[in-house]
Structures are given as structure tokens and as C-alpha cells.
């Protein structure tokens, strides 16, 4: 699954034909633009997906600093934090943060724990509702 990156260097970052500063520049991406990359790990280079124009971009440069930021990873971190800090007594909030985490591809113990907490909360609410209905029925008898 491609990751989303944002150009964080001004005014632009070069898109090259291969993962090297010596490869020809095939274009540029402006500050703030987003793109999707299929792979990372070639000495800080990412390969831009064909649908976003293809080519290779450097994420971090020794002289220039950070060029691209991985927004997919940033968003996943935000969603994991939201999972950790969600109100465990609110079905609506738990449902919302779990859905957001799933959309961002969050997996692992935080999501599993939140899903388990939501199931327990729903069971408690169902039991409470049933007890209230029984009490109301008993009062009407």
C-alpha cells in the first residue's frame, strides 16, 4: 500500500529518474504538495507511484534537511494517540476513533484493545437498557 508524503521543503523538491542526486531531474514538486510513494529505504529515497507522475524523491538531505514528511505515518500516530485517549465510556467517541484508526491502516494492540473496550461498553449498555426496561415493566404491573 503506498504511503502519502508531503513536500515540506521550500520552494520545491526535485523528482529524479532514479534514486541518486546524479540522476536527471524529470520534474519538481512544490512545497505543500502531496504524493504517494510505493517504496522507501533506498538511502532515504522514495519511488513515487506512476499515477502521481513516477520518479524518485529524496526524503532527507544532509545539507538541506527534511524534504518530505510521511503524512501516512503522522496520521497513524495521531489515530493511535486518539485510541489511547478516547473516553472509554462513550460508544460514539470509541466508534469514531476506531473507524478513523481503521481508515489510516492502524493495526496492533491499541486497536484491538479499543475494539474490546467498545464491545464491553456496548454489552454494559445493553444490560443497563434491559434492566431499565424490566424495572419499567415491573412498575407498570
Image: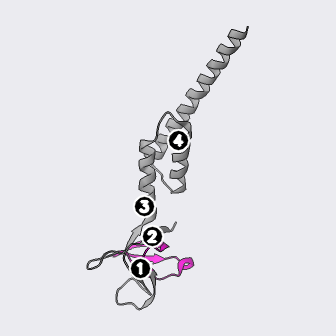
Q: Distance between the residues labelled 1 and 4?
A: 38 Å
Q: Residue beneath label 3, please?
A: 73
Q: Distance between the residues labelled 1 and 3?
A: 17 Å
Whether the residues at callouts 4 and 3 have beta carbons within 8 Å, the answer is no
Within 10 Å of disc 4 (Cα), the crowding (few <14, some 14-19, many 20+) is: some
Left or right: 135 with respect to 55?
right
Residue 122 is situated, as x and y percent measured from the top left of the image, at 57, 32
Magenta range:
30-59
Q: Does the magenta stretch include residue 36?
A: yes
Identify the secondary structure beneath mark 3: helix
Q: Distance between the residues labelled 2 and 1?
A: 10 Å
Q: Nearer the viewer, residue 100 or 119?
A: 100
Q: Which of marks 1 and 4 is in front?
A: 4
Q: Earlier in the sequence, mark 4 or mark 2?
A: 2
Q: Residue beneath label 1, please?
A: 57
Residue at left offset 60%, top offset 23%: 127
Identify the secondary structure beneath mark 2: strand
Which disc, if any, is residue 5?
A: 2
Q: Earlier in the sequence, mark 1 or mark 4?
A: 1
Q: Residue beneath label 4, please?
A: 93
Taking the view exactly as shown, the residue that stands out farthest to the left is: 63
Whether the residues at callouts 2 and 1 have beta carbons within 8 Å, the answer is yes
Q: Which of 66 and 113 is in front in this view?
A: 66
Amino acid at each position: 500500500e503506498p504511503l502519502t508524503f508531503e513536500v515540506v521543503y521550500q520552494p520545491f523538491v526535485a523528482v529524479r529518474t532514479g534514486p541518486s542526486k546524479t540522476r536527471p531531474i524529470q520534474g519538481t514538486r512544490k512545497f505543500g504538495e502531496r504524493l504517494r510513494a510505493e517504496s522507501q529505504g533506498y538511502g532515504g529515497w522514495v519511488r513515487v507511484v506512476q499515477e502521481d507522475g513516477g520518479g524518485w524523491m529524496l526524503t532527507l538531505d544532509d545539507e538541506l534537511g527534511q524534504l518530505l514528511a510521511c503524512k501516512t505515518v503522522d496520521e497513524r500516530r495521531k489515530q493511535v494517540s486518539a485510541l489511547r485517549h478516547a473516553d472509554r465510556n462513550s460508544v460514539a467517541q470509541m466508534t469514531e476513533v476506531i473507524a478513523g484508526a481503521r481508515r489510516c491502516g492502524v493495526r496492533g494492540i491499541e486497536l484491538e484493545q479499543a475494539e474490546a473496550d467498545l464491545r464491553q461498553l456496548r454489552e454494559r449498555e445493553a444490560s443497563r437498557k434491559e434492566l431499565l426496561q424490566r424495572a419499567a415493566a415491573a412498575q407498570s404491573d
